[in-house]
Image: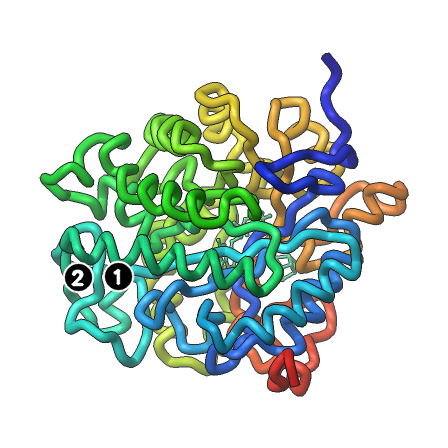
Amino acid sequence: MSNPSPFDPVRIGPLNLRNRFIKSGANEGMAKGGVPSKMLVEHHRGIAAGGAAMTTVAYCAVSADGRTFVDQVRLEPGSVKHLRVLTDAVHGEGAAVCAQITHGGAFTFLPELSTRYPRSASGGFNAAGVISGRLFRTAMKLEDLERTADEFVTAAKLAREAGFNAVEIHMGHGYLLSQFLSPAYNKRRDEYGGGAEQRARFPAMVLRRVLDAVGKDLAVSCKICVTEGFKGGATAQDAAAVARVLEREGAHLLVLSGGMNVEAPWAIFGSPMPRAATDTLQNPVIRTATRILRLWEPKISFHELYFMEHSRQVRAAVRMPLGYLGGVTSMAGVEQAMAEGFDCVVMARALIHDAQLVNKFRSGAATRSGCTACNECVVMMYTPGGTSCVLNAPNDAELNRTPAAS
Ligand SMILES: Cc1cc2nc3c(=O)[nH]c(=O)nc-3n(C[C@H](O)[C@H](O)[C@H](O)COP(=O)(O)O)c2cc1C
Ligand code: SF4
């Protein structure tokens, strides 16, 4: 059988996508004080107009403690009217829209938390706390697991109410659910710790409850790490075991990412973190964090499809739909991902650089992205206009100060 064209439609659970290009969740910096802005609407409308089948609104926190920063979307009743403007705008361009539902666990820089120590899979030293001042994390009790799973459910229901077509449960990059998946974080001796399958138990419980609550109406995907990118972190073999658990539980799609925010942020991007740009950051916490992280950054040079070797091992382990992510920058790369059996390609930087790229791939006007993998857009997240490519003009800061529904 021949490979599907990336421009063929694909079914993900209850959702039909018009093609196989998905915009990956990439923190937009477009929700000052947690309120989704008109800029956030424009950003996602632009990606939809540029031809992607689905765009993902990044880091929608499932609770106040689940945020990493104050300026992040929180899925609460008051956000629904703003997010409804966004989902209507995306639908108006013929695309679908996904909410990435997330809890940061011990990875948080909030000035206030409801608990003395941030919660995680296990207690102990909290590396992220070197910056936030929260040097220790506390192990979640069974009642914390129950409550947090229910927070994911409430967030998914609010996403449905706001008009989203999908939710992506964030299980990667060092946030709460990946703190359960990671052998470096999860040292539990109960049924939620142990080998890769046991560590997947709480993430799978969250998935099951979200599926039960919204899975008939919304596509439910999970973003996982195919490698955590550091010694002592989860491997591709672990990821294959996790994928089998999530497939059994009924996930509609897995988005295959990698790297960890604290231990290996460069692994998320397949390229070094930007140097000069981070020194100009206004926020002292973020500036210090990025400087400290540089101390143990290995020499790394970008290459296209940088997670392919690891992702292939997950592809071989399951039959369910998989989205390839990591350095998709050319039409040849997209075709390779299709030829290797992936169902979709999931892209962040190439679409931050050029929201029209999918249309250009389709028409032949471009065969390669102009993104240089410099990662300076990561720093732009904290600027008044929010995330944008430094090769383009910055976003409209006024639009980013204006609530979406005003
Ligand atoms: C500015 C920026 C912000 C990001 N924020 C998030 C985020 O909030 N959630 C997430 O899962 N990934 C986030 N990422 C990672 C991307 O989703 C993606 O995993 C990574 O950029 C690799 O894909 P790419 O090679 O297509 O860019 C971010 C990436 C960028 C560039
Ligand atoms: S700033 Fe632009 S060129 Fe650099 S990684 Fe981001 S999107 Fe690519």
Q: Say above or below: 137 vs 278.
A: above
| SS at mark 2 in the image | strand
Instruction: Pinpoint residue 317: horizontal percent, then vertical percent.
Output: 44, 21
Left of 306 or right of it: where is 179?
left
Instruction: Pinpoint residue 285: horizontal percent, then vertical percent.
Output: 35, 76
At 47% from the left edge and 73% from the top edge, which residue is drawn? 77
| SS at mark 1 in the image | loop
Mark 2 or mark 1: name the one nearer the start of the chain: 1
Left of 188 or right of it: where is 27?
right
In 3D space, how far apart are the residues under numbered discs 2 and 1 (Cα atoms)?
A: 6 Å
Q: Amino acid at mark 1?
A: Ala
Q: Say above or below: 69 vs 239.
A: below
At 15% from the left edge and 43% from the top edge, which residue is drawn? 187
Query: How many numbered circles are shown?
Result: 2
Left of 397 or right of it: where is 169?
left
Mark 2, residues whose alpha carbon is within 10 Å: few (<14), some, or many (≥20)? Answer: many
Q: Nearer the viewer, residue 383 or 320?
A: 320
Instruction: Pinpoint residue 210: horizontal percent, then vertical percent.
Output: 42, 48
Instruction: Pinpoint residue 350: horizontal percent, then vertical percent.
Output: 67, 52
At 52% from the left edge and 64% from the top edge, which residue is drawn? 27
Q: Amino acid at mark 2?
A: Arg
Q: Say above or below: 275 vs 363.
A: below
Does the image show residue 48?
yes
User: Can you identify the residue that label 2 sits on?
Assistant: 137
Q: Nearer the viewer, residue 147 or 327?
A: 147
Q: Are marks 2 and 1 in contact (CB under 8 Å)?
A: yes
Q: Quadrant of residue 232?
A: top left
Q: Which mark is residue 106?
A: 1
Going by the picture, which residue comes out furthest to the top? 1
Q: Quadrant of the C terminus?
A: bottom right
